[in-house]
Image (cartoon, rainbow, N blue to C red):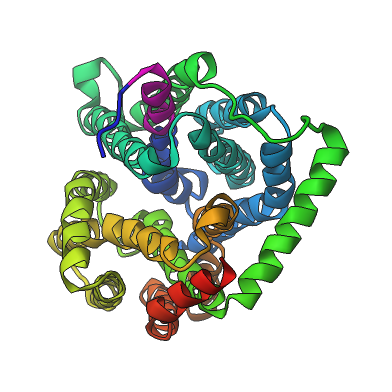
Amino acid sequence: MKVKLDKPVISWALYDWANSAFATCIMAGFFPIFFKGYWNYGVDVSTSTFRLGLANSTGSLFVILLAPLLGAIADKGRTRKKFLFAFTLLGVVLSASLSLVPQGNWQIASLAYILAIIGFSGALIFYDSLLIGIASPDKRDMVSSIGFGAGYLGGGLLFGLNVFMALKPSFFGLPNAETAIRISFVMVSLWWIFFSLPLLRWVPEPPIQHAPQKGWESARHGVKQLISTFHEIRRLRVVFLFLIAYWLYIDGVDTIVRMAVDYGMSLGFDSNSLIVALLITQFVGFPSALVFGMIGGKIGTKKAILIGLCVYTGVTIWAVFMNSVIEFYGLAVVIGLVQGGVQSLSRSLYSRIIPQGQAAEFFGFYNMLGKFAAIIGPLLMGGLSILTGSPRISILSIVILFVSGGILLCFVDEKKGADLVREIR
């Protein structure tokens, strides 16, 4: 489907380009490195892993608790852009503040990171809801893909520059890699806020079918709608089963993203090598997602997702026995090959088992699970790291999420789900 790249579409996609700087440069990249080697300087690796896992899980948990209220405001009011900007500003300010946290002060670093995650994830709720105002239903998949691609590219470009700064600080007139990483936190904030401005200027608020509601009125009606949608999901057993499966395996995917660098450092790998590996994953991911989509069209979407989960399981087991940076690079390539594919095919499978007339409501629930999933995995890794003192055993726990999610996915009957949808009509 051909999409006209007008100002609203480009401006909307640029926000994905903007906020991916936080997800790539801070969440997956430099924060785990600084957290373990600088803010937890001299601390046992198992303890620092637990602290990082706790910070990631706490941030995600707060967003989950806030999500129904935020979703209610997005559905019932006309203040999406105002709230998006407020949460963006929270993420921007807290990201920049990481550059000021002194060595050894892991508590302040954790607090700033948790608040930045809340800003990042909270803004995404309103960002997603703006899609319906810039694209007709038949063009939303393509517009969404443009945003997806912009995120990979934008986050990768800034991360590449920041990695070069950390590896070659003297080239930029900087004294050391520590200073380069501190500056990268500020660069992420500037990138994020600058490329958010077009959205605020040119993306319209979506029309609503009722008089705009404000404050607690919008929250009350929105929460009632969320409860109604949840009850309908429970009635549609195929949808309910898929969402449980998705919650589990996407939690594993997100945990790998957030904890991979910490794990590599726990094994004694050089931090510079680890961020190069992340850069590899970033640039392998986007084209691989497109190829994986074609594979799904050939063999079936569910089978392709299961292949991806099998690869993730194998990668996790491989990581337990890994001893060299070269192996870590290999893992980065393999993860890049399946990461985008698992995410994109999960979405397309879900779209075929939900009532088409209620797609916005059902996808709202799906997006909430997908974006705020990383709670169980980081806690599993952190808790086992403390209990066993072994980072290798801690990462093995993620296999539980991939295997259990994959087993449940096997029982998702796409044809039965489509038949139930037709009965509802």
50 or 332: nearer the viewer: 332
At x 68%, y 41%, the residue is 75
Measured as percent of width and height from the top left, residue 254 is found at 43, 59
Who is closer to the viewer here, 194 or 46? 194
Looking at the image, residue 305 sits to the left or right of residue 332; the answer is: right
- In the figure, is residue 377 to the left or right of 81? left
Task: State the image quarter where residue 338 is shown.
Answer: bottom left
| Placement of the N terminus among the 4 image quadrants | top left
What residue span does the magenta drawing correspond to?
6-18
Front residue of 282 and 48? 282
Image quadrant containing the C terminus: bottom right
Count of marks, rendered view = 0
14 within the magenta span = yes
Residue occupying the point 22% across, 58% down: 293
Q: Main secondary structure of the magenta part?
A: helix
Hey, which quadrant is residue 376 in on the image? Answer: bottom right
Q: Is residue 312 above or below residue 409?
A: above
Q: Residue at x 54, y 27 (%)?
A: 92
Residue 62 drawn at (x, y percent): 68, 52
Q: Is residue 341 above or below residue 7?
A: below
Q: Is residue 141 visible?
A: yes
Q: Position of residue 256 (x, y in %)?
A: 37, 62
Give the farthest residue toward the right.
Answer: 216
The front one of 364 and 326 is 364
Is 272 positioned to the left or the right of 19 in the image?
A: left
Residue 24 appears in the figure: no
With 383 as the anchor, is 224 left or right in this view? Answer: right
